[in-house]
Image (spheres, rainbow, N blue to C red):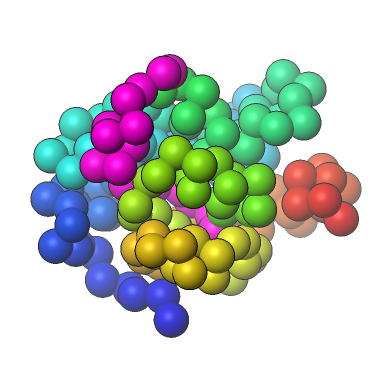
Amino acid sequence: MSSSSSSSSSSSFDDKKGMQIALEQAKKSFAEGGIPIGGCLIKSDGTLLSTGHNQRVQKGSAILHGEMSVLEHAGRLPASTYRDCTMYTTLSPCSMCTGAILLYGIKRVVVGENETFMGGEALLKQNGVEVVNLDDEGCKEILQKFISEKPHCWNEDIGV
Protein backbone atom coordinates (compact mmCIF):
# COMPACT_ATOMS: atom_id res chain seq x y z
CA MET A 1 0.00 0.00 0.00
CA SER A 2 1.24 3.45 -0.87
CA SER A 3 1.29 6.13 1.73
CA SER A 4 -0.49 9.35 0.93
CA SER A 5 1.20 11.44 3.58
CA SER A 6 3.07 14.53 2.50
CA SER A 7 5.93 14.18 4.92
CA SER A 8 8.12 11.50 6.36
CA SER A 9 10.53 11.11 9.21
CA SER A 10 13.27 10.28 6.69
CA SER A 11 13.02 13.66 4.99
CA SER A 12 12.94 17.19 6.39
CA PHE A 13 11.83 18.56 3.02
CA ASP A 14 8.13 19.07 2.23
CA ASP A 15 7.05 16.48 -0.34
CA LYS A 16 4.49 18.81 -1.92
CA LYS A 17 7.25 21.33 -2.66
CA GLY A 18 9.37 18.59 -4.21
CA MET A 19 6.44 17.45 -6.34
CA GLN A 20 5.80 21.03 -7.47
CA ILE A 21 9.38 21.15 -8.79
CA ALA A 22 8.82 17.82 -10.57
CA LEU A 23 5.51 19.01 -12.03
CA GLU A 24 7.15 22.19 -13.35
CA GLN A 25 9.62 19.92 -15.16
CA ALA A 26 6.72 17.90 -16.60
CA LYS A 27 5.13 21.13 -17.86
CA LYS A 28 8.45 22.11 -19.43
CA SER A 29 8.57 18.81 -21.32
CA PHE A 30 4.96 19.23 -22.45
CA ALA A 31 5.73 22.76 -23.73
CA GLU A 32 8.67 21.30 -25.71
CA GLY A 33 6.34 18.74 -27.33
CA GLY A 34 7.59 15.93 -25.12
CA ILE A 35 6.06 13.49 -22.70
CA PRO A 36 5.09 15.41 -19.54
CA ILE A 37 6.91 13.49 -16.85
CA GLY A 38 9.30 15.37 -14.61
CA GLY A 39 11.35 14.84 -11.54
CA CYS A 40 13.98 16.08 -9.16
CA LEU A 41 16.52 14.73 -6.68
CA ILE A 42 16.54 16.36 -3.26
CA LYS A 43 18.77 15.62 -0.27
CA SER A 44 17.11 15.05 3.08
CA ASP A 45 18.28 18.52 4.20
CA GLY A 46 16.28 20.10 1.36
CA THR A 47 19.17 20.71 -1.05
CA LEU A 48 18.01 20.42 -4.66
CA LEU A 49 20.65 18.39 -6.50
CA SER A 50 19.06 18.14 -9.93
CA THR A 51 15.92 18.38 -12.01
CA GLY A 52 14.95 16.72 -15.25
CA HIS A 53 12.13 15.71 -17.50
CA ASN A 54 11.33 13.10 -20.11
CA GLN A 55 13.28 13.97 -23.27
CA ARG A 56 12.68 10.93 -25.43
CA VAL A 57 10.86 13.00 -28.06
CA GLN A 58 13.05 16.09 -27.86
CA LYS A 59 16.37 14.21 -28.09
CA GLY A 60 15.25 11.10 -29.95
CA SER A 61 16.44 9.11 -26.95
CA ALA A 62 15.46 5.59 -26.04
CA ILE A 63 16.26 6.07 -22.35
CA LEU A 64 15.76 9.68 -21.23
CA HIS A 65 12.70 9.13 -19.08
CA GLY A 66 12.09 11.75 -16.39
CA GLU A 67 14.00 9.92 -13.66
CA MET A 68 16.88 9.08 -15.99
CA SER A 69 17.11 12.75 -16.96
CA VAL A 70 17.24 13.71 -13.27
CA LEU A 71 20.11 11.27 -12.69
CA GLU A 72 21.91 12.48 -15.81
CA HIS A 73 21.69 16.09 -14.65
CA ALA A 74 22.91 15.16 -11.16
CA GLY A 75 26.22 14.02 -12.63
CA ARG A 76 28.58 11.74 -10.79
CA LEU A 77 27.83 11.67 -7.08
CA PRO A 78 29.18 9.54 -4.25
CA ALA A 79 26.94 6.59 -3.34
CA SER A 80 26.40 8.12 0.11
CA THR A 81 24.78 11.17 -1.50
CA TYR A 82 22.18 9.09 -3.35
CA ARG A 83 21.34 7.18 -0.16
CA ASP A 84 20.48 10.53 1.48
CA CYS A 85 18.08 11.62 -1.27
CA THR A 86 14.48 11.46 -2.33
CA MET A 87 13.62 11.04 -6.00
CA TYR A 88 10.48 12.97 -6.87
CA THR A 89 8.73 11.88 -10.04
CA THR A 90 5.35 12.86 -11.42
CA LEU A 91 4.59 9.26 -12.42
CA SER A 92 5.30 5.84 -10.94
CA PRO A 93 8.75 4.81 -12.25
CA CYS A 94 8.93 2.21 -15.03
CA SER A 95 11.16 -0.87 -14.82
CA MET A 96 14.19 0.97 -16.28
CA CYS A 97 13.88 3.90 -13.88
CA THR A 98 13.15 1.57 -10.95
CA GLY A 99 16.38 -0.27 -11.75
CA ALA A 100 18.36 2.97 -11.78
CA ILE A 101 16.86 4.01 -8.44
CA LEU A 102 17.88 0.65 -6.97
CA LEU A 103 21.32 0.75 -8.59
CA TYR A 104 22.16 4.11 -7.05
CA GLY A 105 20.68 3.24 -3.65
CA ILE A 106 18.08 5.98 -3.49
CA LYS A 107 16.09 5.09 -0.37
CA ARG A 108 12.96 7.19 -0.92
CA VAL A 109 10.74 7.85 -3.94
CA VAL A 110 7.76 10.19 -4.02
CA VAL A 111 5.44 9.70 -6.99
CA GLY A 112 2.85 12.17 -8.16
CA GLU A 113 0.50 9.42 -9.23
CA ASN A 114 0.29 5.78 -10.22
CA GLU A 115 -3.23 5.60 -11.64
CA THR A 116 -2.20 6.33 -15.22
CA PHE A 117 0.72 3.91 -15.03
CA MET A 118 1.89 1.59 -12.26
CA GLY A 119 5.59 1.02 -12.48
CA GLY A 120 8.00 -0.88 -10.26
CA GLU A 121 6.76 0.31 -6.90
CA ALA A 122 6.47 -3.24 -5.52
CA LEU A 123 10.09 -3.97 -6.49
CA LEU A 124 11.24 -0.75 -4.88
CA LYS A 125 9.43 -1.63 -1.65
CA GLN A 126 10.80 -5.20 -1.72
CA ASN A 127 14.25 -3.65 -1.77
CA GLY A 128 13.66 -1.38 1.20
CA VAL A 129 12.79 1.82 -0.67
CA GLU A 130 10.12 3.98 0.91
CA VAL A 131 7.50 4.84 -1.73
CA VAL A 132 5.04 7.68 -1.15
CA ASN A 133 2.17 8.31 -3.58
CA LEU A 134 0.78 11.86 -3.44
CA ASP A 135 -2.09 11.03 -5.83
CA ASP A 136 -1.66 14.50 -7.34
CA GLU A 137 -4.41 15.73 -9.67
CA GLY A 138 -2.05 18.08 -11.53
CA CYS A 139 0.24 15.17 -12.42
CA LYS A 140 -2.74 13.14 -13.64
CA GLU A 141 -4.25 15.98 -15.68
CA ILE A 142 -1.17 16.90 -17.69
CA LEU A 143 -0.37 13.29 -18.54
CA GLN A 144 -3.96 12.46 -19.46
CA LYS A 145 -4.02 15.49 -21.78
CA PHE A 146 -0.84 14.29 -23.47
CA ILE A 147 -2.14 10.72 -23.81
CA SER A 148 -5.37 11.92 -25.41
CA GLU A 149 -3.41 14.06 -27.89
CA LYS A 150 -0.56 11.62 -28.65
CA PRO A 151 -1.52 8.07 -27.65
CA HIS A 152 1.04 6.51 -30.04
CA CYS A 153 3.88 8.44 -28.39
CA TRP A 154 2.69 7.44 -24.91
CA ASN A 155 2.47 3.77 -25.91
CA GLU A 156 6.02 3.94 -27.27
CA ASP A 157 7.24 5.45 -23.99
CA ILE A 158 5.80 2.62 -21.89
CA GLY A 159 6.88 -0.10 -24.31
CA VAL A 160 3.47 -1.02 -25.74
Left of 65 or right of it: where is 92?
A: left
Q: Position of residue 76 (x, y in %)?
A: 41, 18
Q: Nearer the viewer, residue 156 or 73?
A: 73
Quadrant of the drawing holding the N terminus? bottom left
Q: Using the image, determine if residue 38 lies above or below residue 121.
A: above
Is residue 74 shown in magenta?
Answer: no
Question: Which residues are the magenta region?
Answer: 75-92
Q: Position of residue 152 (x, y in %)?
A: 87, 48
Residue 21 appearing in the image: yes
Image point (56%, 51%), residue name: 98
Residue 121 appearing in the image: no
Q: Using the image, determine if residue 45 lies above or below residue 92.
A: above
Q: Could you tell me how many numbered marks the image carries?
A: 0
Question: Based on the displayed image, in which of its 4 quarters is residue 123 positioned?
Answer: bottom right
Quadrant of the drawing holding the C terminus? bottom right
Q: Using the image, determine if residue 147 lies above or below residue 157.
A: below
Image point (48%, 30%), residue name: 71
The residue most toward the bottom is 1
Image point (71%, 22%), residue name: 58
Q: Position of residue 6 (x, y in %)?
A: 24, 64
Q: Position of residue 131 (x, y in %)?
A: 39, 64
Image point (16%, 38%), residue name: 46
